[in-house]
Amino acid sequence: MSESFYPPLTTVSQPRGEIGRKAMEMLLAFLAGNDDAQSSVELPTFLKIRASTGLALEK
């Protein structure tokens, strides 16, 4: 969606499907009483640089 703006916006892309799967795994482990269940997870993100990003102007 951010590509349709002018200028196209720079965004951080997150793996939404993997976030949902991991959240469900963690919830099920918690409900099952698994004491070894993870409390946090780090998933990869990707910076999509588009036309809204440019060089900083000197003052």
Image: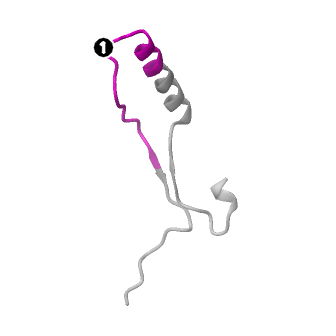
Of residues 44 and 22, the one nearer the viewer is 22
Q: Position of residue 54 (x, y in %)?
A: 47, 72
How would you classify the magenta stretch by its main secondary structure? loop
Q: How far across and how far down the image is residue 39, in percent?
A: 34, 27
Res 9 → quadrant: bottom right
42 shown above or below 13: above
Name the residue type under label 1.
Answer: Asp
Outermost residue on the bottom side: it is 59
Describe residue 37's horizontal placement relative to residue 51 as left or right. Answer: left
Residue at horizontal 62 percent and vertical 63 percent from the top: 8
Q: What stretch is highlighted in magenta?
A: 25-46
Query: At 44% across and 43% down in the image, what residue appears?
Result: 45
What residue sits 38% from the left and 10% below the top?
33
User: Residue 59's image quarter?
Assistant: bottom left
Disc 1 is placed on an element classified as: loop
- The one of 40 and 21 positioned closer to us in this rendering: 40
The answer to whether residue 53 is above or below residue 26 is below
Q: Name the residue under label 1.
A: 35
Whether residue 28 is situated above or below residue 17 in the rendered picture: above
Tell me if mark 1 has few (under 14), some (14-19) or many (20+) residues whose alpha carbon lies within 10 angstroms of its own: few
State whether residue 11 is above or below residue 6.
Answer: above
